[in-house]
Amino acid sequence: MRMTRVAAVAAVAALAVTMTACGGDEGGSTGSSGAKGIVGKAEKQKKLVIGVKADQPGLGLQTGSQYEGFDIEIGKIVAKGLGVDANNIEWKTTVSSNREPFIQQGTVDLVVATYTINDERKQKVNFAGPYFIAGQDLLVKADSAVAGPEGLDGKKVCSVSASTPAKRIQSDYPKAKLQLFDSYSKCLPLLENGQVDAITTDDIILAGYAAQSQYAGKFKVVGKTFSSEPYGIGLKKDDKDGCEKVNEILKTAASDGTYKAAWDATLGKSGKAAPELDTTKLTNCGSV
């Protein structure tokens, strides 16, 4: 009887060791080559979870279960470079305030969501890119006299909580009356109804909103940018190899035409020519 009990204990111990060995690589993310992080997961599982915006026309827009836009195409390019078919991408809607938590908690593998690279965020996550440089601007009614951020004193300005544009208004234009939501789409009816005087975020996002059929002719982008917003691809802070691999994929996309094709199929429909992806400015992964 005692020997049977000892044998049972030994069997349980052996099983525990086996389970630890199987689960000790952050959810089975080590690939056959020994790579970890996103490279290892893509190699082993052939799938990725990518965080994207769902309410930004031309960039990241969800209709039903489908996502479309430039950020979506960039996500597909990166996934393909990692050996993952577009059909094996799980798109996960993110908002500005949960991008870092989603990466840190492993809810997503990557974030491609108009995600400005800055030093504060680089304390929490790593960034590949930038794959696009935007600039903060204002969206106002077509007949508005607001001609730039200097005209915001006493005006009601709508933006998104925890976003770079909102923080810039708070620090640089404190006399503006800032109203914050979790997505820019919630600002649009307020602007239409005159409950706010302006919406602020990156120029290319605002252009996408203004081009929507329901707002045609009602809004205008002021056209006076007052920042530089380098859009990066976020991933876990310690995944330096993954970051460097994504940068390699972006370099290839710039040279083989797939970057331009992604633009032309999405934001290029606005008539704006594809920018040149300057691969000399890609981040030094892991540095602040």
Image (spheres, grey):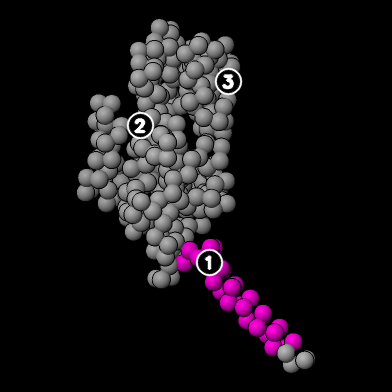
Q: What element carries label 2?
A: loop
Q: Quadrant of residue 64?
A: top left
Q: Is residue 31 visible?
A: yes
Q: Which of marks 2 and 3 is nearer the N terminus?
A: 2
Q: Which residue lies furthest to the left in this view?
A: 256
Dominant secondary structure (helix, strand or loop) of the stretch shown in magenta: helix
Question: Dot 1 corresponds to which residue?
Answer: 25
Q: Which amino acid type is shown beneath numbered disc 2?
A: Gly
155 on left or right of 241: right
Q: In this view, does 125 lie to the left or right of 5?
A: left
Relative vertical location of residue 7 with respect to residue 17 in this rendering, above or below: below
- Magenta run includes residue 153: no
Image point (48%, 57%), residue name: 239
Residue 186: give x, y in percent of width and height. Answer: 52, 24
What range is drawn magenta here? 5-30
- Residue 6 shown in magenta: yes
Check the image and report above or below for 277 versus 237. Answer: above
